Amino acid sequence: MKRFNFAIALLVSVFIQSAFAQPSFTITKASVGGIKVGSTIGEIKRLIPGATFARFQGEGGDEIEAKLNGKTVMWFTAKAGDENYDAPVKDSVKILGIEVYDERYKTVNGIGPGTPLKVAELKYGKLKHIWIEGLTGDEVATFWKHPIGIDFKIAMPVTNPQESAGIYVNDVTNTAVYKEGARISSVSIPGYHGRSFLDDELKMVFADRAGVVEIGMTLKEAKDALAKEMVAEFKRTSGGDGVAYVSVHLLGNEILRLFAGEDDPESAINFDAKIEFIEAWSSEYRTKMGVRPGMKLSDAEKIYGKLQSIGKSEIEAREFVSFENHPVGVVFRVTSKDSEAGIYADGARKTNAFDPEAYVLSISVQGIPNTGPPTEKPTGKRQFIIRNGSDKFDIKIDVEECDGEYCEGAGLVQILRKGESLPFQTISMPSITLEIGKDSKPSVNLIELYGENNSGIVFDDFDFDGNIDLAIRNGNNGAYGGPSYDVYLFSASVYRFVKNAALTTLGSENLGLFRVDKNKRELITFTKSGCCWHQTTHYRVEYGRPYKVLVVTEDATGATEKVVVTTEKRVDGIWKKSVRTKDMN
């Protein structure tokens, strides 16, 4: 009898405790205040006493709003199966996703709706990324120590609800910078439409990243980031333009191709090198609007609008496409099953007609800044803008020291597309030399043998691939104290100027920068020894590497009044040599 009475007392005690227990307001990856994915509306009513429920038609199914005292507490996604949205929500309906707006609800770290982003960063690390979700237009945020299975949307305070919380440049819809006053607006599990935005981000392509791999990461950081998601293998590879890439493989298939500023495809991977370009090949990667490798162009048109053009590159005839509403900073390479993606007129390299079977081959990130100017801030005392060097690019230069006709010292070179205000590439120079003209501006594209007019910036097509390349004068380290240059070849595949070691050597060890012979498609260097020995060398450039094809040496150091002219010429891969003499003039 005593045991029976004890059991009755225990049950009564548990009932009283549960009846008067405080409701839970904790958010975890499994539940919000005890409400779980799969809970019924009837169960939720018991957990939120006094709440009212209304059902609406949403993008991913039914959406149910729970209100308490006239204020929204939560939204749920569900499949009610009843087309009468005015009818009361049935208690038997099971929910698929939860989004909470009530500021009483917090994660175990104390972060919830209404929390300022600055406070959230103290718990979850610096804000990593904000993007505008394509379906709803909501702003979604992730942190470097983001809690698994929980999503955060952000907004400005309710006093200014139409203002964006993120700071976006032009029409780019992702950033890592937010405005003062930005706060968490809602928290959801496992994503409002039954999936996590964080899971999506792991394979989503933006203007500065592809999934967890980001522009500016070192190759080691990228490898470590991928290691948390998959067992990936990093391999050295190269493209038809001679650029050294790193290929990322999963189960034997290439999923990503990375460029980290390396110019020797035969060298070992430098894992300390920083990533400048990312190309996604796997169909698992996609833009935030859902375009992915393998998707037909006709389907991509439904998302980004009518196709504007398909262009074919000089190297390997790669094809790239642009759309009416093309996403900023993202490049789509295309192909077709049995032919080219574009339908071209004879000799043409551009078209707006495409094969019905044409599809997206890869998605690449150009590395265009999307959060403002480069993080490397100019420190120079003088800044110049060069607009007359190229019809495609403008140059902004900061240089440390200027004295009348010359500017010399450490500098920063920012390269902009013609007419744009933000650079797509920034080159930091430990030493740069500019010659200043009578108009107080740097000269451009001037090269003089033995002369004093050798510009700091030279644009020309150095490898004859149809793209304008760039040489930047790094000082006076050439022969006889002449000008020397860092030479950058423009790579259409990575949309960057890539420093070329071989051509930099060619532009730094002779009498100034090499000449460009467009008709013969050759580069020509000049050197000498004293007054009476001169040599002219002609080079062909193949895949970014110069090869000698002709060397003419004039030697007047002998005792006679004759000049010995030695001509060495490469014919069908074989060097042929001839010697003649001429009178000394």
Image (cartoon, grey):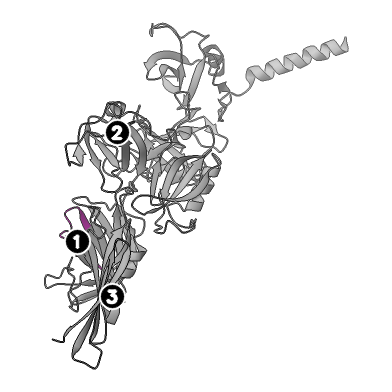
Gap between marks 3 and 2, in whole Å?
46 Å
Mark 1 lies on a secondary structure that is: loop
Mark 2 lies on a secondary structure that is: loop
Furthest residue toward left: 439
Q: Is residue 9 above or below residue 536?
A: above
Q: Earlier in the sequence, mark 3 or mark 1?
A: 3
Q: Identity of the amino acid at label 3? A: Asn
Residue 459: where, in percent of width, then height?
21, 61
Residue 175: where, in percent of width, then height?
36, 43
Q: Quick one: quadrant of the N terminus?
A: top right
Furthest residue toward bottom: 559
Q: Earlier in the sequence, mark 1 or mark 2?
A: 2
Question: Which range is magenta?
Answer: 382-394
**Viewer-nearest of discs 3 and 2:** 2
Q: Is residue 189 above or below residue 19?
A: below
Furthest residue toward right: 1
**Viewer-nearest of discs 3 and 1:** 1
Nearer the observer, 564 or 472 = 564
Q: Is residue 275 above or below residue 380?
A: above
Q: Provide the residue designation for mark 2.
A: 339
Nearer the observer, 182 or 584 = 584
Q: Which mark is residue 510?
A: 3
Q: Residue at x 30, y 64 (%)?
A: 487
Gap between marks 1 and 2, in whole Å?
32 Å
Q: Residue at x 36, y 56 (%)?
A: 375
Dots 3, 1 in contact, CB < 8 A = no
Q: Which mark is residue 442?
A: none
Quadrant in the rendering for residue 473: bottom left
Q: Provide the residue designation for mark 1.
A: 520
Left or right position of 292 against 120: left
Nearer the observer, 406 or 510 = 510
Nearer the observer, 535 or 559 = 559
